[in-house]
């Protein structure tokens, strides 16, 4: 079985759609949920740097929707990654995304970004993966490695007001739309796991029993070298690309979600639960080593400006705590104006009692004083700060930054960034 068959199999019924053809995506109700092309998660889109993704989107929901291309470095304007677009019910829009020729390879994803409806539409199932392949993927050993995409969702279309404030979680955790699906491990060999948290609010603290992960890429692409870890904290919206060596005795091993408390004293942490089962079903004669050098990640130079953002600060006379710098989202207001190609440091301070995962569109960022890598989602822990550095390259126009607990985004924890000609 080749890589593509594995990928197709791992995405359950998902279809693989290639950039070479026009892609048709229809959002529609499906058995008390919402689906793209009647699939949950939606079809996997696959492309390479330099490709054009042409997506004919039809909205068959009873409410407005649109598409956001999470993590892609494409224009935030026009009919591209423009989250201000509204596609009313029974209408269509043809998105055209020209991937730059130097676009990083990696795992990205698409989901609606219609303000006010994002949480329910994504919770209902509207999410799908975008895989950009590049030189790393072309190496024969990597190409022949069985690859599995794992998309985590926990639907909840009837949240209580309290659940919405905390960020809704669902009673069941689905992996590729299924409960506890099974994946093969290869004795003496590797498997590759591409992990996507497409849940509205839930954090996953992942452990594969008795195995470690060799992380090769984060949200925005390859790391300088593989990083070994026993656990992965996967925030809403985040992706991790990791290899797992089959170096344990034959048998079955559980992929676990370990306890994590994102709500401070407001709730006890989740119990440990099983998400999937891994079983040794294949073996190879000889093994190979992961490349020790994956990519060059140059630290961004010193910033021209440092800005401060306060998340969850209560302004005078304001009852909604889901604010940034005391303000609730207003699509007609520019919150942050930056210059094209500028390098900026942002210090994001969480003044609330719960964690908020920060996300920004269009350009990825680096985390200051952390190991090199590119991210588009990172944690601002309750009561603490996150220090990021980013450069606004290639595209002008207005984009967004927000908490990726999508209920918090809906409640107003989102701002606009206008990238202006230098
Ligand atoms: Cu939040």
Image (spheres, helix red, strand yellow):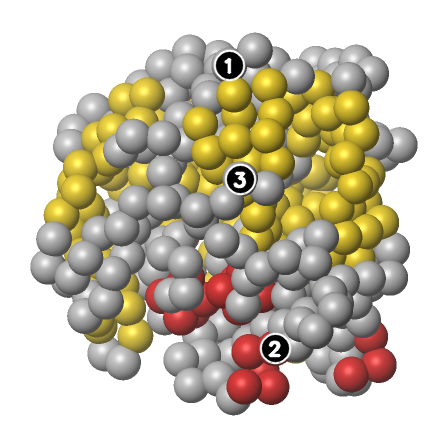
Q: Which residue is mark 3?
A: 334
Which mark is nearer the camera, 3 or 2?
3
Q: Residue 266 appears at what percent x and percent y?
A: 78, 83
Point out the tag, 1 or 2, that comes first from the N-terminus.
2
Spatial distance from mark 1 to mark 3, Cα to Cα? 15 Å
| Structural crowding at the residue carrying mark 1, measured as other residues with C-alpha within 10 Å and reported as few (<14), some (14–19) or many (≥20) | few
Q: Is residue 66 above or below residue 80?
A: below
Q: Which residue is mark 1?
A: 421
Q: Residue 146 appears at what percent x and percent y?
A: 48, 40
What's the mark number on residue 290? Answer: none
Answer with the quarter of the image where residue 384 lies: bottom right
Q: Residue 159 appears at what percent x and percent y?
A: 48, 84
Q: Is residue 195 above or below residue 102?
A: below
The quadrant of the picture occupied by the N terminus is top left
Spatial distance from mark 3 to mark 2, Cα to Cα? 26 Å
Point out the tag, 3 or 2, that comes first from the N-terminus.
2
Residue drawn 64% across the image and 66% down it: 322
Q: Residue 77 appears at what percent x and percent y?
A: 36, 30
In front: 202, or 139? 202
**Secondary structure state at the residue bearing disc 3:** loop
Answer with the quarter of the image where residue 346 lies: top right
Q: Is residue 4 above or below residue 414?
A: above
Residue drawn 46% across the image and 21% down it: 396
Q: Which residue is mark 2?
A: 165
Callout 1 touching callout 2 (CB < 8 Å)? no
Spatial distance from mark 1 to mark 2, Cα to Cα? 38 Å
């Amino acid at each position: 079985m080749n890589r593509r068959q594995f990928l197709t199999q791992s995405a359950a019924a998902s279809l693989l759609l290639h950039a070479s053809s026009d892609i048709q995506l229809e959002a529609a109700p499906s058995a008390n949920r919402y689906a793209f092309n009647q699939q949950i998660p939606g079809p996997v889109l696959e492309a390479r740097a330099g490709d054009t993704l042409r997506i004919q989107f039809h909205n068959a929901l009873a409410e407005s929707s649109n598409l956001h291309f999470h993590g892609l470095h494409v224009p935030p304007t026009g009919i591209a990654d423009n989250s201000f677009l509204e596609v009313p019910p029974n209408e269509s829009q043809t998105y055209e995304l020209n991937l730059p020729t130097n676009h990083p390879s990696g795992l990205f994803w698409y989901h609606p970004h219609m303000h006010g409806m994002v949480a329910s539409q994504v919770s209902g199932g509207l999410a799908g993966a975008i895989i950009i392949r590049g030189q790393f993927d072309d190496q024969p050993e990597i190409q022949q490695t069985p690859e599995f995409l794992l998309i985590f969702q926990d639907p909840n279309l009837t949240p209580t007001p309290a659940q919405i404030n905390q960020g809704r979680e669902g009673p069941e955790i689905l992996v590729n739309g299924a409960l506890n699906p099974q994946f093969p491990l290869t004795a003496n060999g590797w498997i590759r796991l591409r992990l996507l948290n497409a849940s509205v609010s839930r954090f996953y603290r992942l452990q594969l029993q008795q195995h470690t992960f060799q992380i090769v890429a984060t949200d925005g692409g390859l790391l300088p070298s593989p990083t070994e870890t026993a656990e992965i904290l996967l925030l809403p919206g985040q992706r991790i690309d990791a290899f797992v060596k089959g170096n344990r005795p034959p048998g079955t091993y559980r992929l676990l979600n370990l306890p994590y408390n994102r709500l401070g004293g407001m709730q006890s942490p989740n119990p440990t639960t099983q998400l999937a089962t891994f079983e040794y079903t294949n073996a190879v004669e000889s093994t190979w080593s992961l490349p020790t050098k994956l990519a060059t990640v140059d630290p961004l130079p010193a910033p021209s400006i440092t800005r401060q953002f306060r998340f969850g600060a209560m302004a005078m006379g304001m009852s909604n705590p889901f604010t940034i710098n005391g303000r609730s989202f207003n699509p007609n207001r520019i919150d942050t104006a930056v210059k094209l190609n500028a390098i900026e440091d942002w210090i994001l301070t969480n003044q609330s009692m719960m964690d908020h995962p920060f996300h920004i569109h269009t350009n990825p960022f680096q985390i200051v004083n952390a190991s090199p890598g590119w991210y588009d989602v990172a944690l601002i822990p309750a009561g603490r700060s996150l220090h990021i550095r980013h450069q606004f390259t290639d595209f002008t126009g207005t984009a967004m930054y927000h908490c990726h607990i999508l209920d918090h985004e809906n409640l107003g924890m989102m701002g606009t960034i206008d990238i202006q000609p230098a």
